[in-house]
Amino acid sequence: MKTQFDYVSLGERIRKARKSKGMTQEQLAEACDLSTAHIGHIERGTRALSIESLITISEVLKISTDYLLLDISNSPDKNITKILNSIDNINEDKYNKFYSVVKILAENIDKL
């Protein structure tokens, strides 16, 4: 039995995530190297998107593909959400340093 994928719901979740980040369709399109018209079609569910585009959109919006595809939220607890929000707009160098510190802490948690 073949099931039909719900592109309209996928598009709605992308639109919601984009708006929650304060982005326009033009900004999302530019960040994803897609046309604004294509983003519009994706958000309306009138055009399918490639796996590559899905992954790029999820990375740009910093949201899981599980949520976008299946409306499955792996919501982190409130403290993790606060941490993620605090680093949301930092540059890549600072993000990488932050990640390195967290990784070291995680690897040595038993020693603390």
Image (tube, helix red, strand yellow):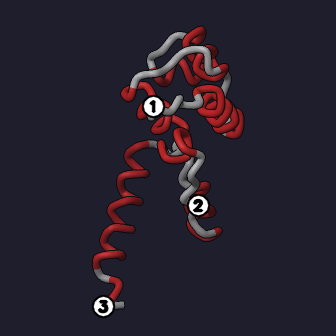
Query: What is the distance, in whole Å, between disc 1 and disc 3 at their CAs?
Result: 52 Å
Nearer mark to the viewer, of 1 and 3: 1
- Disc 3 on helix, strand or loop? helix
Q: Residues within 10 Å of mark 3 (few under 14, many from 20)?
A: few
Q: On residue 111, which mark appears?
A: 3
Q: Nearer the viewer, residue 47 or 76?
A: 47
Measuring from the top left, give residue 95's x and y in whole percent: 42, 51
What amino acid is found at the position of numbered circle 1 in the picture?
Lys
Q: Earlier in the sequence, mark 3 or mark 2?
A: 2
Asked if residue 43 lies left or right of residue 97, the reply is right
Against 35, residue 58 (above or below) is: below
Query: What is the distance, in whole Å, between disc 3 and disc 2 at their CAs?
Result: 28 Å
Q: Please tell me in which quadrant of the rendered image residue 2 appears.
A: top left
What amino acid is found at the position of numbered circle 3 in the picture?
Lys
**Which residue position is annotated with label 2?**
75
Check contact, mark 2 vs mark 1: CB within 8 A.
no
Q: Nearer the viewer, residue 14 or 103?
A: 14
Q: Nearer the viewer, residue 83 or 49?
A: 49
Measuring from the top left, give residue 89's x and y in whole percent: 56, 44
Q: Quadrant of the N terminus?
A: top left
Against 70, residue 14 (above or below) is: above
**Which residue position is annotated with label 1?**
2
Against 112, residue 105 (above or below) is: above
What amino acid is found at the position of numbered circle 2 in the picture?
Ser
